[in-house]
Image (cartoon, rainbow, N blue to C red):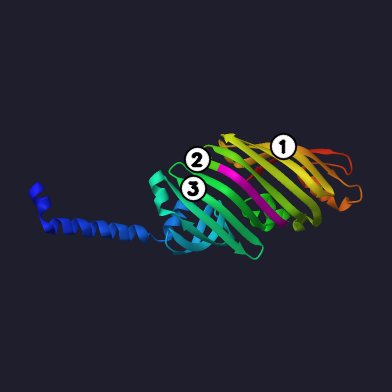
Amino acid sequence: MRVALRRPGVWLVALGVGAYLVFLAVNLPASWMGFALESASGGALALGDPEGTAWKGGGVLALRSRAAYARVTEVEWRCNPLSVFTGRLNVALSGAEHETQLRANISIGAAAVYFQNVEASVPAALIEPAIPAAAFAKPEGSLRVKAESVEFGKTWMRGAASAEWIDAGLSGMQAPRLGDYRLQITASGDRAELKLATLRGDLRLSGEGEWRASRPRVVQLRGTAEVAPERKDLQPVLGAMGARGIGASQAFAWTLPI
C-alpha cells in the first residue's frame, strides 16, 4: 500500500478528486438553499426560481400552508462557507418588493434553525392562504414582525418576537379602519405564550393565548373586545368573534387553525 502511494500517478488522481470535490462545493446549486430552507422551516417556507449558488444567490420566497403557496418577495442571500465547519450554515437574507421588506440572519443546523435580527413588513393579505378564516375576512393593512433572537426545533421553540397589524381592516366584512394591534410571542420549550394588545383604534382588543408543539397548526386566544358606540358597523366583526353587544366589554375565545 505504501509503495502504491509513492507512485506519482496515485497522488495525481487523489489531487484531481480533491479538486473536483472543491469545485462541486463551490458551485453547489442555489436549489440546495431552497431544500435547506424548506427542511429547516418544517415546510412552512419554500424557495422558487433559485439562481446563483448556495453561497450567493436569489429566488422567490413563498409561504406555504397545506397545499397553498403565497408569494412573499424576491430575496437574495449570502452564506459564509466556513460556517459549515461549526455544524451550522449561516445565511444573511434580504428582500424588498412593493409593500414587502425583509431582513434576517439565519443559522441552519441539523436539528434547529436560529433567527436573529429579523425585521419584516408584508401586506396583511399574505396570511389568507395560511389561515382559513382570513380568506373570508380579507385582511387589509400591513404586518410587521420583529425578533432579536428566536430558535426553532421540531418540537420546541425558544425566544421572543412581536407581530404588529398596522392600519388593520377586514374588507370581506365591510370593516375598514379597525386600528393597530400587537401580538407578543414568548416561547420556551414546547409552549409559546401570546399576549394581544390594541395600540389604537375603535375596536379595542386585549387577550392572551398559547401555541403548543403538540398541536403545531393550532393557535388559541382568549380575551375581551370592545367597540366604540358610534361604530355600529363593526357589529358583524363582534359576531364573528363570538362576542355580542356594542360598547360593553365582551369576552371572546378563538381557536385558529393555521
Name the kind of residue labelled 2 in the image: Lys
Magenta stretch contains residue 249: no
Name the kind of residue labelled 1 in the image: Glu
Work out which residue is located at the far left of the displayed protein and give it. Answer: 3
Q: How far, Cα to Cα, is label 2 from label 3?
A: 15 Å
User: Which residue was labeled with disc 2?
Assistant: 154
Magenta segment boundaries in residue numbering: 141-150
Callout 1: SS: strand
Callout 2: SS: loop
Q: Position of residue 214 (x, y in %)?
A: 56, 35
Residue at 72% x, 51% y is: 165
Q: Specify whether residue 212 is in view.
A: yes
Instruction: Decide: few, some or many residues near mark 1? Use Cα within 10 Å; few <14, some 14-19, many ≥20.
Output: some
Residue at 20% x, 55% y is: 14
Q: Earlier in the sequence, mark 1 or mark 3?
A: 3
Q: Specify whether residue 1 is in view.
A: no
Count of numbered tags: 3
Q: Position of residue 213 (x, y in %)?
A: 56, 37
Name the kind of residue labelled 3 in the image: Ser
User: Which residue was labeled with disc 1?
Assistant: 208
Callout 3: SS: strand
Residue at 45% x, 61% y is: 56
| Disc 2 and disc 3 in contact, CB within 8 angstroms | no
Q: Earlier in the sequence, mark 1 or mark 2?
A: 2
Q: How far, Cα to Cα, is label 1 from label 3?
A: 30 Å
**Where, by quadrant of the figure, is residue 149 drawn?**
top right
User: Which residue was labeled with disc 3?
Assistant: 107
Q: Is residue 83 above or below residue 210?
A: below
